[in-house]
Image (cartoon, helix red, strand yellow):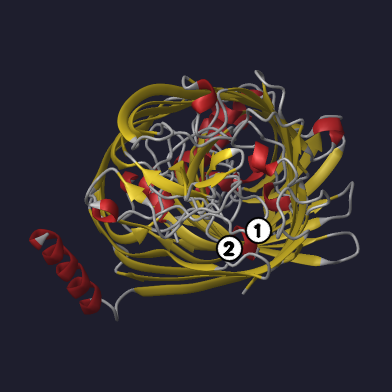
């Protein structure tokens, strides 16, 4: 830590010395107005049929001498219906220095690993900001020390992650929530260090010809908690849980992600092997800590036809298969599923795009349908539409079943300042 | 996508007269011109510039794109380039890394700042519009000699200059063009005008080059390019500013870490 502090101090010193020579900064701010309508009757009382929220994301970036920079990116959302969805987060707050081929990052940041479109199985550094969207693409800022050593077509990365971020869940008044209230302030941990457990990760990534690959090892707290039955009361029908309590076990993950790009084809694969601590609950007994290990994978292709029908339109076809060794116990709900989608791009001045797809559970017949479309209104405004439908959801699909009444259509207007 | 590195300027130029005299067929003459033009611009090393595109539809409505470009000359292969997008604001921070190749498809990676994701993309979309403009991807990519075959047509006056008129035919079957006719001035071998013919062999677009300046006493670059689509009435003006050469850039400024860092 001493050495890191020294490097940091040196970096800042160099920065201030040459500030007059070469200093660059930019401030980017965007705010969004988001409206959701839920046409179906709510599955739970207290849930509303509409949802209105505003969000603000700002990023200040300052760079000295090209090699040293500071990034600060706060985010806030105010949701009129769901208190738990109203939140603020420091998405990024880090210093970065480049020393020839070595890049050092200190602070809160975001990192993405992976290749596939639907499910980001390999991506594990950042916690999912699950109240933002069910697509899992919004992430909370993660405190980290990150080293990246670039060696031509290959780079080696090492991460130390000294603090854990808990996953946020929608509140009782919100749609797209768990079947019972989640005790978000009372999470259980396998490690006695709880949120202070030091996680670490190493990754090799690079490309060779048409192949892009990443091979990684992560050891630390699982990002996706197990939800345990809690606050059990006796009813005439027997004991029943009235809340869910998150349990964060320890997780080791070995992962591979790869993409082969040939002509108009992108062939994609993500695979993980995990060993994870879980709590086994038997009614009337204290929960038992067990170790499970399992594999999961997703892979498929994206094929694009450019300039179809003598226009500037591109049409892409996507197919990805999702598999998880745990079957019904898969904590992402995708154990034997097929994702089919099409991507349209008008390549016009307004950058009109659309991605429409369906995920089919090949065991149960449940279907999840998603449409995302967007177009620019002018040089600083964008309009986005999102449609999500939960169709024919089987009661054994425990993850999607609570969402079965939560079909929604969303309009979002984003203004860039 | 090495926007406007020297080669991009389609600087097909004529060799010295003795060489021309050696060339027997119009095809050999055309190739000799292309090779000489390419060699005349060698040695620029690296460059940086700011680019502004003004897109106009047939009613005269305008929209603006701004980007910054960094390019690196690569011995024995196509150039490397990094483009950082500033306007429109919804794509601000997006960056595109291209390793162009003399043979085969280029390698391209796109950085998406919202997801912090670097994505390898298919690079065989030659004829699609770049940023919704009248410039196709192949118009702004690195113009390697090997990507065309050539035919010398004639020499004729072009404004105050005299120009060689050369036809060139894309080697790549994914190209949106059957041929291009280019006018190259005989004094400095700079592209002055190009007519593009579409797959139906109809005249589709005309590109003109304006306000050339010479950098490092050697390399000519236009300050403005005008692309007019004759079939739709749309046009795009591309202007360059803040040209800087030999900034000490190297391979490590054109890798995936630099792509994700680019601002």
Q: Give the number of marks.
A: 2
- In percent of width and height, residue B62 lies at 79, 66
Q: Which of labels 1 and 2 is toward the front?
A: 1
Say whether marks 1 and 2 touch (CB < 8 Å): yes
Q: Answer yes or no: is residue B255 visible.
A: no
Query: In the structure shown, which secondary structural element does the residue marked by tag 1 occupy?
Result: loop
Query: Mark 2 highlights which residue?
Result: A85
- In percent of width and height, residue A234 lies at 53, 45
Query: In the structure shown, which secondary structural element does the residue marked by tag 2 occupy?
Result: loop
From this view, report whether residue B173 is shown above or below residue B218: above
Relative horizontal placement of residue B148, taking residue B57 as reference (left or right): left
Which residue appears at 45% of the width and 59% of the height? B48
Q: Which of the 4 quarters of the picture holds residue B226?
A: bottom right
Q: Quadrant of the C terminus of chain B?
A: bottom left
Tell me how far mark 1 sits from mark 2, CA to CA. 8 Å
- In percent of width and height, residue A188 lies at 35, 49
Give residue A174's mark: 1
Relative horizontal placement of residue A86, taking residue A54 as reference (left or right): left
- The residue lying toward the viewer, choosing from B115 and B118, is B115
- Residue situated furthest left in the rendering: A2
Label 1 CA crowd tier, 10 Å (few <14, some 14–19, many 20+): many
User: Considering only order in the chain, which callout, 2 or 1, is on the residue closer to the N terminus?
Assistant: 2
From this view, report whether residue A282 is shown above or below residue A56: above
- The residue lying toward the viewer, choosing from A188 and B262, is A188
Label 2 CA crowd tier, 10 Å (few <14, some 14–19, many 20+): many
Which residue appears at 72% of the width and 22% of the height? A365
- In percent of width and height, residue B6 lies at 51, 49
From this view, report whether residue B235 is shown above or below residue A363: below
Chain containing the residue with disc 1:
A
Chain containing the residue with disc 2:
A
From this view, report whether residue A386 is shown above or below residue A48: above
């Amino acid at each position: 830590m001493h050495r890191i502090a020294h490097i940091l101090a040196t970096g800042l010193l160099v920065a201030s010395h040459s500030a007059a020579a070469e200093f660059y900064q930019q401030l980017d701010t965007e705010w969004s107005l988001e409206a959701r309508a839920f046409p179906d009757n709510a599955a739970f009382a207290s849930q509303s049929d509409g949802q209105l929220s505003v969000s603000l994301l700002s990023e200040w970036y300052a760079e000295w001498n090209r090699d040293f920079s500071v990034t600060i990116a706060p985010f806030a959302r105010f949701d009129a219906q769901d208190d738990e969805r109203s939140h603020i987060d420091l998405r990024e707050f880090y210093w970065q220095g480049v020393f020839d081929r070595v890049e050092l990052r200190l602070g809160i940041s975001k990192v993405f690993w992976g290749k596939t479109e639907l499910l980001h199985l390999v991506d594990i550094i950042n916690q999912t900001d699950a109240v933002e969207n069910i697509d899992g693409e919004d992430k909370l800022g993660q405190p980290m020390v990150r080293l990246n050593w670039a060696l031509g077509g290959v780079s080696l990365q090492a991460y130390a992650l000294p603090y854990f971020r808990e996953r946020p869940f929608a509140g009782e008044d919100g749609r797209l929530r768990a079947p019972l209230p989640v005790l978000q302030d009372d999470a259980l941990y396998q490690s006695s260090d709880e949120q202070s457990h030091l996680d670490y990760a190493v990754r090799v990534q690079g490309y060779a010809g048409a192949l892009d690959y990443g091979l990684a090892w992560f050891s630390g707290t699982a990002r996706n908690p197990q939800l345990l039955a809690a606050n059990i009361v006796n009813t005439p029908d027997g004991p029943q849980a009235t809340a869910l309590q998150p349990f964060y076990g320890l997780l080791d993950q070995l992962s591979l992600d790869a993409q082969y790009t040939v002509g108009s084809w992108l062939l994609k694969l993500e695979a993980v092997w995990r060993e994870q601590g879980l709590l086994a609950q038997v009614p009337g007994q204290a929960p038992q800590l067990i170790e499970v290990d399992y594999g999961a994978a997703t892979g498929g292709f994206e094929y694009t036809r450019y300039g179809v029908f003598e226009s500037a339109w591109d049409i892409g076809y996507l197919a990805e298969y999702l598999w998880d060794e745990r079957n019904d116990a898969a904590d992402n709900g995708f154990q034997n599923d097929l994702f089919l989608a099409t991507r349209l791009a008008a390549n016009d001045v307004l950058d009109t795009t659309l991605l429409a797809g369906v995920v089919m559970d090949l065991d149960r017949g449940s279907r999840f349908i998603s449409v995302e479309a967007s177009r620019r209104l002018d040089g600083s405004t964008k309009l986005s539409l999102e449609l999500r439908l939960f169709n024919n959801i089987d009661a054994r699909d425990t993850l999607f079943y609570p969402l079965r009444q939560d079909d929604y259509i969303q309009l979002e207007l984003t203004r860039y300042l | 996508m090495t926007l406007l590195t020297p080669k991009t300027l389609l600087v097909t130029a004529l060799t010295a007269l003795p060489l021309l005299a050696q060339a027997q067929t119009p095809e050999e003459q055309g190739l000799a011109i292309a090779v000489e033009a390419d060699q005349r611009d060698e040695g620029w090393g690296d460059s940086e510039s700011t680019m502004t595109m003004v897109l106009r539809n047939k009613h005269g409505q305008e929209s603006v794109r701004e980007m910054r470009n960094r390019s690196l000359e690569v011995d024995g292969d196509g150039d490397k380039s990094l483009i950082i997008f500033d306007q429109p604001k919804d794509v601000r921070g997006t960056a595109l890394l291209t390793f162009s190749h003399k043979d085969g498809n280029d390698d391209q990676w796109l950085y998406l700042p919202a997801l912090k994701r670097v994505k390898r993309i298919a690079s065989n979309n030659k004829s699609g519009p770049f940023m919704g403009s009248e410039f196709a991807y192949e118009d702004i990519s690195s113009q390697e000699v090997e990507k065309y075959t050539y035919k010398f047509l004639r020499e004729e006056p072009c404004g105050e200059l005299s120009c060689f008129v050369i036809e060139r035919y894309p080697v790549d079957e994914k190209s949106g063009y059957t041929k291009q006719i280019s006018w190259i001035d005989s004094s400095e071998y700079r592209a002055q005008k190009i007519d593009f013919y579409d797959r139906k062999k109809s005249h589709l677009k005309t590109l003109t080059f304006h306000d050339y300046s010479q950098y490092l006493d050697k390399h000519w670059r236009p300050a403005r390019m005008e692309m007019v689509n004759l079939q739709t009435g749309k046009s795009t003006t591309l202007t360059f500013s803040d040209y800087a050469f030999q900034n000490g850039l190297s391979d490590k400024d054109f890798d995936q870490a630099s792509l994700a860092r680019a601002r």
